[in-house]
Amino acid sequence: MRFKLLACEVLAREVYLCAARSPHIIDVELVEKGLHNTPDLLRVELQGRINRTRDGLYDAILLGYGLCGNSLLGLTARNVRLVMPRAHDCITLYLGARSLYDQQFAENPGTYYYTADYIERTGSDVESIGVSLGSATQANIQAVYNEYVAKYGKDNADYLMEVMGAWSEHYSRAVFIDHEHTRFLGYEQVAIDEARRRGWSYLKVAGSLALIGQLMSGDWPPEDFLVIEPGQKVVPSYDDQVVCAVPGEGE
């Protein structure tokens, strides 16, 4: 089979490595990381690339993204299906499993996340690393709030967000997601130095290529991946599935 992969550039090393290991032909297109800060523009960019894909060339378009602060909300499959991980953001992709993301988020919401790839592509602008990688952007906060409203009701959602307010304003921990294939770059020291400078605790956790690799394998179990058929669009599910597909307008 032949796939087109649209992925954030912060996953460049991971997606190229997994593409090389895939039994399928995979054409990789990287998208500029700064678009995460403007979800509407990222959505327009991704939809444009989907729309411009030549008919009949690919068996699927793979999305190396999570919901990412609702950046993928409303993204629509045209003449070929889309496939995306059931993930809130790229932290899930770096960790390799949604359950690991959920555990980290539940136990320590006030966390800055660092990876070698993001540090590499951010350069000296370390102030933006954790915010962009983690779950603290305003769009993501709103998405989580909406999910809580749907699951627990507005009053309970308001209480939960108040209790977890430190997540958006007062970080206390730095986490470096470690991958063997980027360890030689030595970027963990950036995370250590930042944690020390800010007075945060520090933790290194093991990353995994499992989810990215499976995305490119063509094996998409429904508990981990959403397949959006032509004419369908992506919407949040506001439950453990993270995302679901519904008919697009006019379908």
Image (cartoon, rainbow, N blue to C red):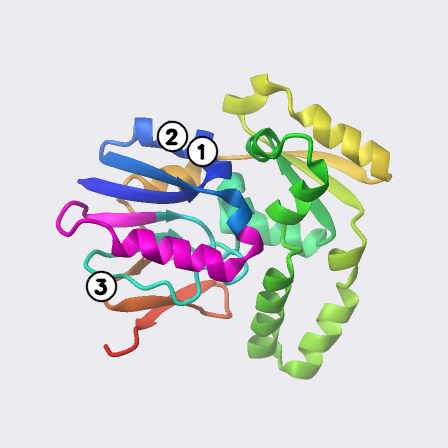
**Which is more N-terminal, label 3 or label 2?**
2
Return the x and y of residue 64 as percentages of the image width and height.
Answer: 41, 46
Spatial distance from mark 1 to mark 2, Cα to Cα? Answer: 6 Å
Asked if the magenta segment contains residue 46, the reply would be yes
Spatial distance from mark 2 to mark 3, Cα to Cα? Answer: 27 Å
Q: Amino acid at mark 1?
A: Ala
Return the x and y of residue 222 as percentages of the image width and height.
Answer: 34, 57
Spatial distance from mark 3 to mark 1, Cα to Cα? Answer: 27 Å
Quadrant containing the N terminus is: top left
At horizontal 23% and vertical 31% (from top left) the residue drawn is: 23
Mark number displayed over residue 230: 3
Q: Nearer the viewer, residue 243 or 75?
A: 75
Return the x and y of residue 55 as percentages of the image width and height.
Answer: 15, 52
Which residue lies under the disc numbered 2? 16
Mark number displayed over residue 66: none
Q: Are marks 1 and 2 in contact (CB under 8 Å)?
A: yes
Of helix, strand and loop, which one carries label 3?
loop
Q: Which residues are magenta?
A: 36-62
Q: Amino acid at mark 2?
A: Tyr
Identify the image quadrant of residue 159. Answer: bottom right
Q: Is residue 225 visible?
A: no
Q: Amino acid at mark 3?
A: Pro
At horizontal 58% and vertical 35% (from top left) the residue drawn is: 118
Which residue lies under the disc numbered 1? 12
Label 2 CA crowd tier, 10 Å (few <14, some 14–19, many 20+): some
Label 1 CA crowd tier, 10 Å (few <14, some 14–19, many 20+): some
Of helix, strand and loop, which one carries label 1?
helix
